[in-house]
Image (tube, rainbow, N blue to C red):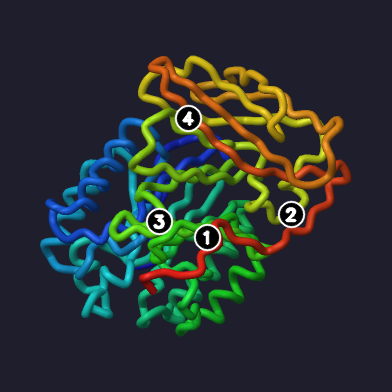
Amino acid sequence: MTGKVQPSVREAQRGEAITFVVPGDLHLTDAGQENYRVAQWAMGEINGLIRPDFVVFIGDNTQDAAPAQFALFNALRARLTVPHDVLVGDHDVHDDPQATGFRHHIGETYGARKFLGARFLRLNTQQARPLGMSADQVAWLGDQVDAARAAGEQVVVFQHNYPFQIWEDFDGPGMDEWRGIVQTRRIAALVCGHTHYFQEANDGRNVAVAVRSIGDPEGGQPGYLVGYLHGDDLAFAYRTVEDDGPFILVMHPRDALLATGPRHVICGEDQVRVWTRTTSSIASARWRVDAGDWHLLERAGDDQWAGRLSVAGRFKGKHDLEVEVRDAGGRTGRRQQEFMVDVTGRYNPVPAVRPVVTQTQFC
């Protein structure tokens, strides 16, 4: 049934950290293409390295919505050892506006997953071409968000179309109503595909991320996005097919671009918290701020590390954080991001995107 709410994929206490992976748009045609090889690599890393709570395929899973392409996609996703959901992209309804093929080969076109005190909503933004949602789906979205707020759940929305894509109007049926929901409720994140390039955006109220495509990628190498949600901590890290060292995600402090209010800035004594994954073991982990002295991270649980972060002597504003992890095999992983400091606890976000993209071959 469309709009079905799925139960949690594992039992745990409310407020436990949640991790998910979003591979880029696959655009599958046949098994002899490079994008299929990269997709196989991603499935292997998801199973063997990241081991997330669940996976979301963000749409454009096929190139032309041909039965053989759906069969190739189904064989690929069957390799996953964790639960997963599938979104509809414009290529998945090629010459099929009712998504008949998608429904036959995949299943429902939108729905929700309730999990560990959060609600993950997946939308079908292809109910009108080139973009749109039916009145029924928009009403369902509003009901889901309101129900989540009443239950004290955070909301993450997955949709194929990215609201900040260049050279494309985000202005189809139902989009004004969509804006009325996401701009008047707190949405933890909007996770999207479609653009072929990777970008993170903050409109001053909500954050959004577009995952770079695996098929026909722009602006860098193809790969997958890892998302992390735990209370007020929200983090993303992108891993490409060229990355072979330890995976690093900074759980805290929150990336400055993702900060949407005072609760996301450092205003007192705090911690740096890091999550790692490796096929070996971690030999060392360290961090520093503003290219200063390095400090060792101490183990704080399975695949987690922590260090004391002091605001003493730090100016109000944006600071640079660098984390370096080395595994037993000598491979090194690095992660850099900015975070905000204000000892008064005040913060008003300025809309921004990263990286700035001014042209694209796809829209």
Mark closest to the chain's N terminus, 2 or 4: 2
Whether residue 121 is visible, yes or no, is: no
Label 4's element? strand
Q: Earlier in the sequence, mark 4 or mark 3?
A: 3
Q: Percent from the top left, x then y, of residue 352?
A: 64, 62
Q: CA distance from mark 2 to mark 3?
A: 27 Å
Where is residue 263? Give x, y as percent. 74, 47
Bin the neighbour count of mark 2 within 10 Å (Cα to Cα): few under 14, some 14-19, many 20 and up: some
Q: Which residue is mark 4?
A: 333
Instruction: Give the distance between the C-alpha atoms of the residues marked 2 and 4, in whole angstroms.
Output: 30 Å
Q: Residue at x 50, y 82 (%)?
A: 171
| Residue 149, quarter of picture | bottom right
Task: Choose the circle earlier in sequence order: 3 or 1.
Answer: 1
Front of the two marks 2 and 4:
4
Badge number at residue 212:
3
Residue bearing the label numbered 2: 261
Q: Which residue is tagged 1?
A: 190
